[in-house]
Image: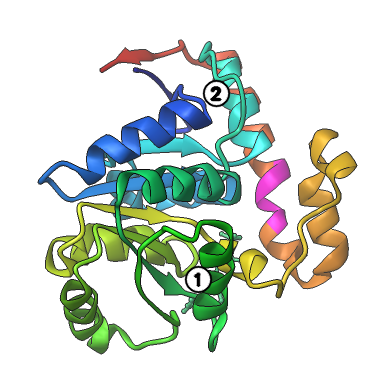
Amino acid sequence: MRSVRVLGCRVDAIDVSGAVARIVALARGSEPSLVVTLGTEMVVRARTDARFREVVNRSALSLCDTIGVLFAARLWGARIPERVAGIELIDPLCAAFAREGISIYLLGAKGDTAERAARTLRERYPTLVIAGARDGYFAPADDESVADAIARTGAQVALLGLGSPRQECWIDAHLLRAGCAVGIGIGGSFDVLAGNVERAPEAWQRANLEWLYRLLKEPQRWRRQLALPYFVLLTLRERLFARPTLEES
Ligand code: UDP
């Protein structure tokens, strides 16, 4: 698999079906593996947060979650055919897990959102084994007891929607204790599955304007979204003044 570095973060050149096949293989392995869905804000954060950058770069899979990261990865010569956003990965992934008998645990979001997301997935994939679900509002002091509770369910894959960088750092620190082979950071996807948040209409998605739709719907996000123009500036600067680094693994 080919990878490129975008502002110091590894991005793997893989499409949705390749990512699903790799995650299924990782779920059968014995090493705990982190799967990152790398967004623009995450790359900007990683520039100044060395621990987070390390976690991203030693992940088993670093997928291109946003159009910004896709654009930058292509500038660096990666042939990535499409975005592999968390929300778009969930359906093909759950279809594969249902087929292969791989069980999952849903951790994240407010109140009963994860349970409602589980219900949606059960309706779509009746043979999918959902070993458990819980909300993502717990204190760091409870990290280990949450991991132990996941371990008791015997889930093989944990989907984490705690927001970034918490979800990636949590997987890095606690996946072994949780007894899962794979942990995937999926951001706000449970909110979409549970119907709390609407995705942009298809036309907006096709025009790569999902970020704008989200900004209009949730104007309080404007400060976070400043990461996007900043990311574009940094990427163009890096592309003009540095040499591309393609990696093979
Ligand atoms: N969240 C959580 N625990 C926290 C903070 C956030 O479970 O302590 C959840 C939040 O409810 C939301 C998700 O994490 O469901 C991430 O939301 P955000 O919009 O930040 O994610 P994005 O999709 O932008 O990464």
Q: Nearer the viewer, residue 178 or 133?
A: 133
Q: Say which residue label 1 marks.
A: 118
**Measured along the vertical axis of the image, is residue 78 above or below residue 33?**
above
Classed neighbour count for the residue bearing mark 1: other residues with Cα under 10 Å, few (<14), some (14–19), many (≥20): many
- Amino acid type for the residue under numbered disc 2: Ala
| Residue type (three-letter) at the residue carrying disc 1 | Ala
Q: Main secondary structure of the magenta part?
A: helix
Mark 2 or 1, nearer chain start = 2
**In the picture provided, is 41 more to the left or to the right than 214?**
left
Q: Position of residue 189 (x, y in %)?
A: 58, 61
Residue at 28 percent across and 42 percent down: it is 59
Q: Is residue 136 above or below residue 75?
A: below
Residue 1, percent across and down? 34, 17
Label 2 belongs to which residue? Answer: 73
- Disc count in the image? 2
Alpha carbon separation for disc pair 2 and 1:
33 Å
Q: Which type of secondary structure does the marked residue at label 1 adopt?
A: helix
Q: Nearer the viewer, mark 2 or mark 1?
A: 1
